[in-house]
Image (cartoon, grey):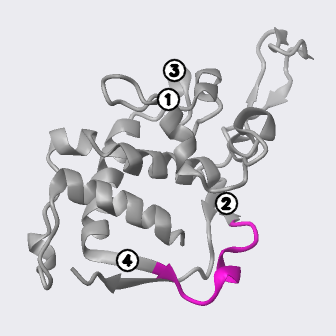
Amino acid sequence: MHPEIQDKARQEVIDVVGDIERGTPAEDVPYPTADQERLLTYLSCVIKEVMRLYPSVTLVPQRFTTAPVTLSDGTSLPIDTLISGDIYSMHHSKQVWGPDADEFKPDRFLASVGPDGEIPMHPGASNFMWTPFGGGQRICLGQQFSLVEQRVVLSMLLLRYKWTIVGDENALKGNPGTLPGGLLHSAGLQVKLTRRDV
């Protein structure tokens, strides 16, 4: 499960939040303050890359066009055309993300770190190419809460544990399945948490 990426994210958390002593009880593991959480740049990249490759929701709900529409590539859609956005395919598009689109590379998001430390989405996101929360007027209201919560929880887990896949690397092979409603899941995937030797 990418131990080098775990180590890099863990070191960032240690640098920002501080490390823990061996045997620290779970309830005493520090969680990042709001100011510290914003400094977890690399962890944010990891989260965005996971959500790019494995968005929870894979499809935008279907809609019918209410007027004729011409897309940016010149494609014309007549009135009453059934349309839907395929988030999974957009997030795996080699045209947008490059020839390594199917590879787990959190560093692809580092190229767009701003001077204030914020991480703007990958440049393709300005054209709705990174859309695990949707986009535009219908973007998920919980996007920022979710991203903050993921950084806080993952930072606490990284301080306390290393995680590995149960079985060999083949456990990660294959395509994840979808549940009714287009929710992505990995059936049968088991993760082992091992306490860190601090």
Q: In the rendered view, would you say 129 is above or below 115?
A: below
- The residue pinned by badge 3 equals 137
Q: Distance between the residues labelled 2 and 3?
A: 25 Å
Q: Is mark 3 on a helix, strand or loop?
A: helix
Q: Is residue 162 left or right of residue 111?
A: left
Tell me the kind of residue under disc 1.
Answer: Ser
Label placed on residue 162: 4
Tell me the kind of residue under disc 2.
Answer: Pro
Q: Distance between the residues labelled 1 and 2?
A: 35 Å
- The residue pinned by badge 2 equals 180
Among numbered discs 3 and 4, the one appearing first in the sequence: 3
Number of numbered discs overlaid on the protein picture: 4
Q: Give residue 127's position: percent from left, percent from top.
A: 65, 22
Asked which quadrant contains residue 197, the reply is: bottom left
Q: Is mark 4 on a helix, strand or loop?
A: strand
Q: Are marks 2 and 3 in contact (CB under 8 Å)?
A: no
Q: Is mark 1 on a helix, strand or loop?
A: helix
Among numbered discs 4 and 1, the one appearing first in the sequence: 1
Looking at the rendered image, the disc whose residue lies closer to the viewer, 1 or 2, is 1
For image coordinates 46% across by 35% down, the residue present is: 140
Among numbered discs 1 and 3, the one appearing first in the sequence: 1
In this view, the residue in front, 21 or 55, is 21
Q: Do the residues labelled 4 and 2 touch (CB within 8 Å)?
A: no
Q: How far apart are marks 3 and 4 (CA)?
A: 39 Å
Q: What stretch is highlighted in magenta?
A: 164-176
Tell me the kind of residue under disc 3.
Answer: Gln
Among numbered discs 2 and 3, the one appearing first in the sequence: 3
